[in-house]
Amino acid sequence: MSTRLFRLQGYETDFSTGVCADGRQVVLGLLCPHLTAYFFDRQGELIACERRLWRRPAVSLGPDGPFSMSNPVFAAALRTQMREWQTELGFRTAAIRFREFFDESQFVGIARWPEHLDPREWDGRPETEIGYLEEQRAEWDASGQFVWWWGKDYWVAPDGQVEST
């Protein structure tokens, strides 16, 4: 793990970032079937994760999902539950800065590179392709980008804005 602080800003309705009344930083959003919050101290160290079961479940399209998230009644109930939690936390929307972590149980956290630029994924590739991938990885590193995993991958610019998902 690095000592780098990664900057992240909320993205649409997928997740929100901000600061709690007590100074903790938080990223908060839905990871079916829970609203989930990861809390960080002022230095960017992960200090806690809290999950709350959604009060109004989304319609499941199979025995274990996927879920239909587009139902307006579900979406409204989820927004209400999220606002209530944010109010409880004294949440103020803001970009946050935190250190690298990865929670395998929720598939949430930082990856330094997209999967295709991760050297652990290069076994059996021709040397010419590896050379090209190394060049791309060097460009990626120089750009300051990173991958934020929140149930899926988000490519994030150094200013914390999601550029691609």
Image (cartoon, rainbow, N blue to C red):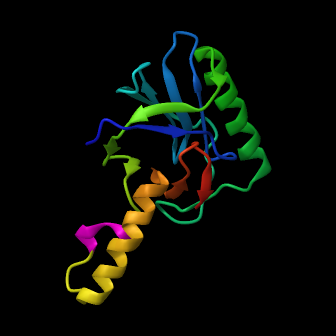
Q: Is residue 141 magenta?
A: no
Q: Main secondary structure of the magenta part?
A: helix
Q: Position of residue 48 (x, y in %)?
A: 37, 25
**Residue 65, placed above or below residue 4:** below
Location of residue 39 in the rendering, given as x and y in whole percent from the top left corner:
44, 26
Percent position of residue 24, x then y: 48, 18
**Residue at the spot 37% in from the left edge and 64% down from the top edge:** 138
**155 left or right of 140 in image:** right
Which residue is most to the top?
22
In the displayed structure, 94 sits above or below 24; it is: below
The residue closer to the viewer here, 113 or 107, is 113
Bounds of the magenta span? 116-121
Residue 116 visible here = no
Residue at position x 35%, y 26% in the image: 45
Residue pictured at 62% horizontal, 57% vertical? 163
Answer yes or no: is residue 126 visible: yes
Residue at screen point 69% across, 27% down:
83
Residue 28, image quadrant: top right
Farthest residue to the right: give it.
72
Looking at the rendered image, the quarter that the C terminus falls into is: bottom right
Above or below: residue 11 compared with residue 61: above
| 119, 53: nearer the viewer | 119
Q: Position of residue 128 (x, y in %)?
A: 29, 88
